[in-house]
Image (cartoon, rainbow, N blue to C red):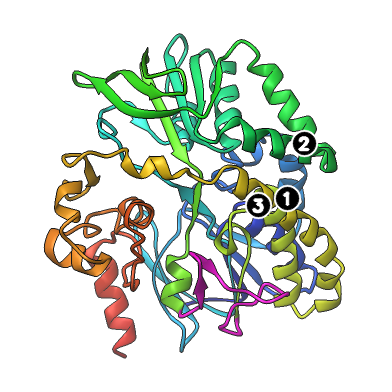
Amino acid sequence: MTSADILIIGAGPAGIAAAVSASTSGRKVMVLDDNLAEGGQIWRGGPRRPVNSEARSWFHRFANSGAELLRGHRAVDCSRRDRILYVETSHAAASLQYKQLILATGARELFIPFPGWTLPNVMGVGGLQALAKAGLDIEGKRVVVGGSGPLLLAVAAYLAEHGAIVSAILEQAPWSRLMRFSAGLVAHPAKLWQAMALKTALASVPYLAGAWITQANGDGRVRSVRIHQSSGARDIACDYLAVAYGLIPNIELASLLGCELRDGSVTVDEFQRSTCPEIFCAGESTGIGGVELSLIEGEIAGYAAAGREDRARKLFPARARALRFAEKLNSAFAPREELRSLPDGETFICRCEDVPLRKLRERRSWRDAKLHTRCGMGPCQGRVCGPATQFLFDWTPESTRPPLFPARISTLITELEKTSR
């Protein structure tokens, strides 16, 4: 069994910052990630293809920190009593023991179902960007980007830079909210500069506020999307549709470990410590806040887990500033009520089990829906339909059970043999 003084789950910005800070104590630090390169979703590509100078700097610090990185490792179960994490790689099962644990599990996109969202070439905003980075040829392809949040601009700019024809960017938030948010960027010069750079790069692309997708149409794949805007509905032809309505914290492992959750994120104290004293959380798992906040929270968690609370405390003012910006961001881009009426009765809400909205309308809760329709029982284990039903019906998932991800039978047998000894 492999062991570490401080085990960090997730090698995105928060996990990298936590590893760099924790390693200053001289303790054995280990970082686990299910990807083959560090960076997470936001810095996908790793140190060989850093997205900007900030990422390059953190990759360099991480490489020289002495922390050990376990690539291609995915957590499937855990034992808080024994402080053991059970993981799976592409070819084997393993167990990792820790003294302190830092969860930097990041976030995933929020999808709000609409008619046609299961058509081929309809995907998440981050999903299309990831495919493009992995080699998908998008040159000359017509792309519509829709949903909510600054990520729409960043992904649209990346796609346009790589030859895609971005037909439109659809932001569901109204202009009134966007103008108030933009005015507040004066207090955050770096973010204002980033926003201006993105707008300049997308100067020729229509940016429609108060607009959203109501339906995707096609025969075998998406061919066009119908959008709603104040001037009326219209159709836009496209080869790809990328859509996401913000982000959802990945809290499944924290939930399984027994950490207290509140409003869909992990509850932490001023040192990023959860209600389980040996477990710290940083980044999007404690609430959506962006890269800057993730890095600061990661540093604080790393120092605190290593017993360097004096160093952690010096970062409190910076975290407070980043939190104020995150609150403004989340308020400006919160999904509007009208989006609850997007799916019709035949729209699949659970894509894994083909459960349409009409069947869910008969149910009273998430548990009731799982028992009677198998909603949330498919391979994604409710990661897509769970947040969707929470938005549509105010349902809350009641429990998390292992395995956290689909796992091989051999992995589960190995874990059972170890726990029965």
For the point 73% across and 50% down, the residue is: 325
Q: What stretch of residues is rendered in magenta? A: 258-278
Q: Are marks 1 and 2 in contact (CB under 8 Å)?
A: no
Q: Earlier in the sequence, mark 1 or mark 2?
A: 2
| x, y percent for residue 306 | 73, 77
Distance between the alpha carbons at the discs numbered 2 and 3:
27 Å
Towards the viewer: 135 or 374: 374
Q: Considering the numbered disc 3 on the image, is that residue within a helix, a strand or a loop?
A: helix
Q: Amino acid at mark 2?
A: Ala
Tell me the chief SS of the magenta region: loop
- Image location of residue 296, percent across then percent down: 74, 59
Residue 218 visible from this viewpoint:
yes
On the image, which quarter does residue 93 sit in?
Answer: bottom left
Magenta stretch: includes residue 182: no
Seen at 71% across and 55% down, the residue is 293
Amino acid type shown at disc 1: Phe
Dot 2 alpha-carbon crowd within 10 angstroms: few under 14, some 14 to 19, many 20 or more: few
Q: Quadrant of the C terminus?
A: bottom left
Q: Is residue 223 left or right of residue 260?
A: left
Disc 2 designates what residue?
A: 183
Could you classify mark 3 by the number of other residues whose Cα lies within 10 Å: few (under 14), some (14-19), or many (20 or more)? many
